[in-house]
Image (cartoon, rainbow, N blue to C red):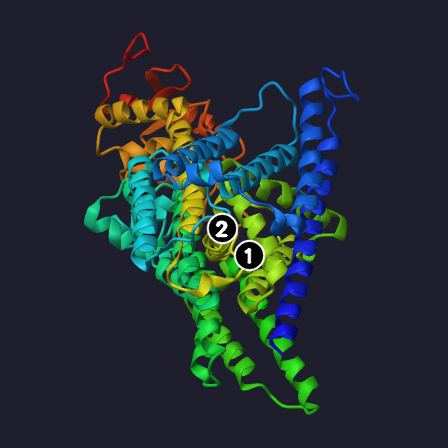
Amino acid sequence: MWQSIAGAAVRTRIKDAWVVSFGWLALHVALLAVLLNHPDINPIVWGYSAPYAAFLVLVAVTGLFGAALFPARDNIRVPQGLAALRSNVLVRLVGLLIGTAAIVVIWTAPFQNIVLTQVQREAIRGWGTLVVLIVIYVGLFWRSATIVLPWSAWVVATATMGAMVVILAVHYLDRFPQLNLIDELHNWSVQWTYANTGLLGEAMYRQMIPLPQPLYPSPHYAIGLMLRFFGDTIWQARFARMLLMMFALPFIYLSGKRMYGARAGLFAVVFALLLIVPVAFVRPDFFVGVMLSVAIYLYLWAQQTRRPWPHYLTGLCIALAGEGHALAYRFGLTFAVLYGLRWLYQMWTTRRLFLDGRFVALVLGGATGMLIYLAIHILPGLEQGLHFASNYAPLNRTIESQSAYASAMLQQQLDAWVSTSPLELIIVVFGVGLALIKFEDGDRLLLALLLVSEGLMLASYGYYRLYYQVHSLPIFALLAGRLVANLFDAKAAGRSRAGPCDRLALASMICVAAFLVLVGNAQAASSDPLRDDYTQIGKRLKADLPADKIVVGNEDYFLEIRSLNYYGIETVTTPSWFLVDYEGYRLWQVTNPDIFILSPQIDTPKYTDLKSIRSYIADNGFKLVRCYTGDQGLITAQVYARDSAGMEPDGSCTVS
């Protein structure tokens, strides 16, 4: 009997080896298919430059060599000299540092001397990262003595990495990511207004009189309340949003622990932090990521019981995620699909019709959340709500136009992830591949949330914004955390709390490299000459403008001025969202400004009605009294005042 069991185990091992070998070869075939379509500017060999042709040969040889070597790995013996050398802790440490540096170089290389498409560039980087990890693993750890680290070592390592990410975020929070001006200032103004007035509206956009407007999401209340305690600048608003986003972390950990083990939960939290930092906008979208994290945990808990409340709470949480953004509906429908498929499967297997109480509880929870949303946002201003729905619903689009939108959204998503979290994106892609191979219960949940929600967005939405990344935060974090925690772990031992040293070493390489790439991106984004200019001008305007005068100017200056007497110059903003009370010349008659600040470099033509402003200036005796120029010379501000408005005119119209 024991011989038959051993024989079956050997056959299974051989089968798995050939599956991995085929997968390795298929990966390199796909990579070559992507890289071959490359119009080289200096063709020498096969229509490519010599370095590029050599690289293609290297990829092909690596694919063939690995595919042939892996099934025969049991017959390979590590040379005694290498075995003795790598047993030295210092040698291993140096090897890990070299590997980490190699990954960082791969992800920070500008590729200036070679013309690549975005997909080709990221494919090369992903392949290079994989090869480095395999070389380090084989060179330092393969067939070496296994050292099992205690759980405390994993906790310390991940806590250290998480602390480093938080410190980085706090340091660069005001500058990284760069301001998404219209969207971010639009939402920060809502939070600032609530913090200073108790009204849910926008101090800058006076065409939206009266305040409040019912369409503003409820998370603005939470951030506005926090701004009352520790300040109301854009830094504090981003910090408040980051603190609120942290509520997702314990649920991401618990979900990862339940699906893949405690190690995966720890690294999922690290990747969640790495993904939070580049999307630290002050929009309410963070609430989608928080509530989806809670809903995933509740879903996993609900599968262990037939009591209705966990299923009801799952539906309620995912419906309330709509407070962050209406796109949360796609996750709600995904959960409904999962519940519905299980219901149909059980009716099929039991050969009887029945009403699944779990599905009913989920629907009731979702309905409760939607009723809360309607009661808060739609019913108090029904005309406003219907106006919003009619402009953003996909019913008035043709199949051709929606297909064009879908294609653009795919490219926008790729651009967004590559520009903010490129290494993390590749790790998630590998994580999706591992989930497809393993296809455990947690894998099926995450894949469904990822693929179904993506399909629904492509089929029903019209554009993608950078801050939408935070919607999928728990999905991406859990997929990446599972992959990294169980890297090269063929025995699926990832559900244990402790783990071998080599797993932690390789995982730390990836996390440290991701952190260093993030540092580079943060440093690059913190250098923003345009923002330096309008910040300098804003400070000068705040010092010079009379505090009791009504001022109309670009929203960027509001970052420094922050006054209820300051009106935004963008008199149209988003008419498909709001039913504005006043527009154009009539708006200026109602708001009755004393001062206009015109900055042609940043006054967005799409939103700035300069014609009505010029007419109002001419009709009401406004004079050009001051001109400001930033130190970088990128922005000028022309100040027009009604009868000078208490400002002494500067005859030269220049201010140092």
Mark 2–mark 1 contact, CB under 8 Å?
Answer: yes
- Cα–Cα gap, marks 2 and 1: 8 Å
The x and y percentages for residue 203 are 33, 44
The residue under the point 28% across, 25% down is 541
Q: Is residue 78 visible?
A: yes
Q: Identify residue type, mark 1.
A: His
State the mark number for residue 578: 2
On the picture, is 610 further left or further right than 276? right
The residue under the point 46% across, 48% down is 144
The crowd level at tag 1 (other Cα within 10 Å; few <14, some 14-19, many 20+) is: some
The crowd level at tag 2 (other Cα within 10 Å; few <14, some 14-19, many 20+) is: some
The x and y percentages for residue 644 are 28, 21
State the mark number for residue 166: none
**Residue closest to the eye, 496 or 259:** 496
The image quadrant where one finds the C terminus is top left
On the picture, is 108 further left or further right than 454? left
- Label 1: element kind: helix
**Residue closest to the eye, 175 or 584:** 175
- Label 2: element kind: loop
**Residue closest to the eye, 506 or 176:** 506
On the picture, is 307 further left or further right than 57? left
The residue under the point 70% across, 85% down is 348
Q: Residue furthest right?
A: 46
Considering only vertical position in the picture, is 609 above or below 204?
above
The image quadrant where one finds the N terminus is bottom right
Q: Earlier in the sequence, mark 2 or mark 1?
A: 1
Q: Which residue is mark 1?
A: 387
Q: Identify residue type, mark 2.
A: Phe
The x and y percentages for residue 117 are 66, 31
The residue under the point 57% across, 49% down is 430
